[in-house]
Image: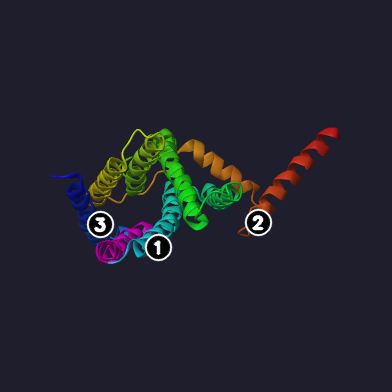
């Protein structure tokens, strides 16, 4: 089998695996807990249904636009899935979940600003839209790898079992992201041929889908058990939070500052 045939086989197998994953996730009612991941899986089938005929029968320019539009859509899905996994890990701790959600939104905004800055300081880029998508996509890959490392490092402390569906979702994306970042570095150093780079990345994506399928098929819903240490953090944040809670964290931080000043004044008296 030639490299072109192997690449085609890997590409065609992707929507088949995604369709199986979508069916399994839906039948096991996991789509209610992870709607972003389920939507992403279904969307990939639709993207393939558009990309494949455009790649084979339309011109290269048409495929170029379709490819980068789908890449931008996948970046949006990636943000939502990372947020979804993060919230599932902190589900037993409402205050930590709210704080993490706010920090995640700021992190997403920073990634977008980083891409804008890189575009502004690199006037040599011939296609700013494409390059901005690529920069944000690489940032997302780094975050996905970091999420897996975070779950591996703190799963015991947070009471997150490695058998949970959220862990499997993060692991699959972490596998894809790690391989993609590695091949990108090797490709930039001219150590990998473009065709080999594509084959390795597609193989890693298929392996990630097998991880999702395995977790979706074997997953058993189980309530997360709060662990003492993060439970204390959660209670501390709850105590610091003002009674008139809003979606913004500014009132909470103002309340923390007021309490700190009051303690200083009391100590002086």
Q: Nearer the viewer, mark 1 or mark 3?
A: 1
Q: Is residue 49 magenta?
A: yes
Q: Position of residue 112 (x, y in %)?
A: 55, 52
User: What distance separates the C-alpha of mark 2 from that of mark 3?
Assistant: 45 Å
Earlier in the chain: of badge 2 and badge 3, it is 3
Marks 1/3 in contact by CB < 8 Å: the verdict is no
Q: Position of residue 25 (x, y in %)?
A: 27, 58
Q: Which residue is mark 2?
A: 243
Q: Nearer the viewer, mark 2 or mark 3?
A: 3
* Mark 2 closeness class: few <14, some 14–19, many ≥20 residues within 10 Å: few
Up the image or down, 119 lies above or below 70; here it is: above
Q: Which residue is mark 3?
A: 18
Secondary structure beneath label 1: helix
Secondary structure beneath label 2: loop
Earlier in the chain: of badge 1 and badge 3, it is 3
Q: Nearer the viewer, mark 2 or mark 1?
A: 1
Q: Nearer the viewer, residue 234 or 200?
A: 200
State the residue lying farthest toward the right.
Answer: 269
Which label sits on residue 65?
1
Residues rendered magenta in the picture: 34-57
| In this rendering, position of residue 23 left or right of residue 112 | left
Q: Taken as a whole, is the magenta stretch helix, strand or loop?
A: helix
Which label sits on residue 9?
none
């Amino acid at each position: 089998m030639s490299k072109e045939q192997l690449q085609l086989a890997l590409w065609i197998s992707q929507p088949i695996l995604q369709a199986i994953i979508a069916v399994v996730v839906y039948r096991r009612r996991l789509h209610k807990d992870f709607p972003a991941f389920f939507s992403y899986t279904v969307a990939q089938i639709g993207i393939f249904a558009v990309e494949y005929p455009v790649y084979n029968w339309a011109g290269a320019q048409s495929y170029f636009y379709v490819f980068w539009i789908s890449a931008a859509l996948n970046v949006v899905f990636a943000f939502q899935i990372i947020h979804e996994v993060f919230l599932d890990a902190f589900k037993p701790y409402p205050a930590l979940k709210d704080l993490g959600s706010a920090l995640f939104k700021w992190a997403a905004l920073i990634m977008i600003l980083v891409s804008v800055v890189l575009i502004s300081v690199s006037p040599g880029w011939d296609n700013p839209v494409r390059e901005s998508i690529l920069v944000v996509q690489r940032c997302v890959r780094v975050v996905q790898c970091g999420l897996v490392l975070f779950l591996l490092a703190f799963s015991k402390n947070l009471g997150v079992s490695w058998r949970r569906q959220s862990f499997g979702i993060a692991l699959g994306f972490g596998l894809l992201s790690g391989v993609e970042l590695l091949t990108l570095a090797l490709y930039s150093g001219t150590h990998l041929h473009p065709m080999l780079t594509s084959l390795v990345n597609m193989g890693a994506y298929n392996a990630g889908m097998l991880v999702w399928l395995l977790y979706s098929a074997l997953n058993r819903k189980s309530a997360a058990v709060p662990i003492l240490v993060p439970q204390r953090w959660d209670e501390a944040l709850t105590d610091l939070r003002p009674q008139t809670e809003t979606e913004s964290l500014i009132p909470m931080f103002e309340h923390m500052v007021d309490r700190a000043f009051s303690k200083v004044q009391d100590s002086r008296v």
